[in-house]
Image (tube, coloured by chain):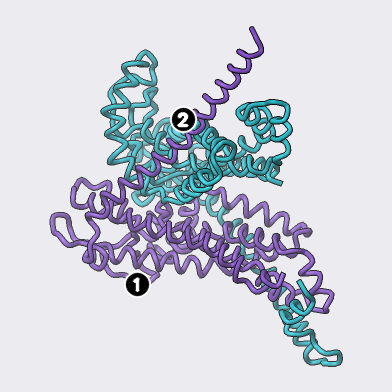
Chain colours: A cyan, B purple
Amino acid sequence: MTEQAVASRLDRPSPPGGRSLRRAQRIASQCFAAALQSSCWLFMLVVGGLAAELIWGARLSIRTFGIGFLWSSQWNPVTQQFGAAPFIYGTLVTSVIALALAAVFGILAAIYLAEFAPRRVGTYLGLLIELLAAVPSIVYGLWGLFVLAPIVANWIGPALQKSLGFLPIFQGTIYGVNVLTASFILTLMIVPTITAITRDLIAAIPTRNREAALALGATRWEVASQVVLPAVHRGILGACLLAFGRALGETIATTMVIGNRPVISASLFAPGYTVASVIANEFTEATSDLYLSALIELGLILMVVSLIVIGLGRLMVRLFIR
Amino acid sequence: MSALSIGRRRKLKNAIWIAVCGLCAAGVAAVLLLIMGYIVREGIGAISIPFLTRLPRPTGIAGGGVANGIVGTAIIVGIGAVMAFPVGVLVGTYLAVYSHKRMAQSLSFVADVLAGVPSIAIGIFAYTLLVEPLRHFSAFSASFAFAVLMVPLVIRATEAAMALVPRELREAATALGAPESRVVLKILVVAARPGIVTGLLLSLARVTGETAPLLFTAFGSQYWELNPAQPMAELSLQIFSYAISPYADWHAQAWAGALILIVAVFLLSVLARLSILLGREGNSIGSAL
């Protein structure tokens, strides 16, 4: 950049002696600093307000049920008994299954895109998967409800029952909308996250590391598995945590395919419920203050847990990309 | 075992693993593409001019549309953007300019934290802040929830775009006697503009189609409602209620709505990427370098 270019950008600095001009500049500078500062405070205020509002809204429920709210499995608006256990169970089971599946497919796909694929294929497939990460969850929910749920009920469910039916998780009546369908939908939604981040992490490894291993006679898979992956495994763990956090907080898609029944059942073929879904379904129907407060407490629990998970994930990915 | 057969085994292992990884990548892309293809197929049949220009009608009566939902989505997202963009860009600028200050470090942490809050929790926040005290569902409260969702994205994008501006540019301007405000506005903002625009567009794409916080803020409506203080129709809410209804004609409309939503989100995402590309070529400072 030449000095003239900079100078023209600046509308020329004020001539020496132009006192009123300098004063105007000082005022402009102060206004600018004030705008920056105040927007920062406004932002902090909103975030503080978010935490405060949720804690304040949940106080009635916290006072009534105490810590037992977390493991009570009663959810009965008529008798005003509220417990979070079925929802926490459903959220954890669906998210863990989704993460396990998405991690396997997502990481292997990322390795292919970054290490093995011809450059063009890698770029286009990667771009495609990134675009698909932006698809709204309502769309996945719609597809899950009308296409995936019948497939699970008629094909995947019976097949699993036939081959692995001795396991309690694959026993019982097969519903279409169930915990397994919700897990599958969540898998589809978080795979792009894992693939995109892992691919970026792998791409950040210097080429000379690979060349050194290749020069020693390593095959390309050996380069990927013994040189590249060990260097990024913590970052990949971070990507998985980010995806897990997304699965925990996902609302609309799970609500549409999990069946919405507040029971804890060992079978994956039975309907379940998640924390986010019960808030989505019952928030506008909460008839008493205690009911509403219990729902807000669920929101608070969800927020705290996903904050911890996503915070950790972000930290690990960030440390790695730098 | 001879050296040759060991070499062969390693080569075989190499080929198998490359194939497995390739299959995974192809499988992931294929499943996602199949879903999109299915939605296009189901949706295209139900899209028509009346669908785009008329109000919803009861099931069984042909010719219902989602015009109010499309307009409602634009209004809610638009007001949210008006709230989120200035704050996000200013905070992002602060982070880039005063990155060494302690306030910037805690702000950066808070922005990360906010980006991790599930949208449904932000919906509860908007409800307790704007709906419950006023005893009224409103489009404005939905916009507020969207703004809270967008702000951390805008902050991160602004900060990242400004961090890429060469330090020498700022130093040159400062050496010529420009005050800090001018350096930021005329150098930093201008040079980082394509990146900032990309961030803004991506944040729009992120909230378009977000449904969860709308359930108890915008709430939905059957009518033409353009007043942000009233409950307002929104496309993804309409898709949701049509999808969980038992009527086949509403299901068809849900597919069509989903198709519109996908097209809108893809357009925003593609525009976001184009903005970076065009910015690189056409930007005045970029070409002066």
Q: Identity of the amino acid at label 1?
A: Leu
Indicate which label's residue lies in the foreground, 2 or 1.
Answer: 2
Residue that protrudes farthest toward the top in the picture? B1
Count of numbered labels shown in the rendering:
2
Q: Quadrant of residue A312?
A: top right
Residue topped by disc 2: A97
SS at badge 1: loop
In front of the other: B198 or B207: B198
Left or right for B243, reference A245: left
Left or right for A298, reference B178: left
In front of the other: B111 or B202: B202
In front of the other: B73 or B4: B4
Q: Please tell me the numbered disc located at residue B256.
A: none
Q: Residue at x 84, y 75 (%)?
A: B175
Which part of the image, by quadrant, shows the N terminus of chain A? bottom right
Question: How far across and how far down the image is residue B21, in percent?
Answer: 51, 31
Q: Is residue B18 above or below residue B287?
A: above
Mark 2 nearby-residue class (10 Å; few <14, some 14–19, many ≥20): some
Residue topped by disc 1: B226
Chain ID, mark 1:
B
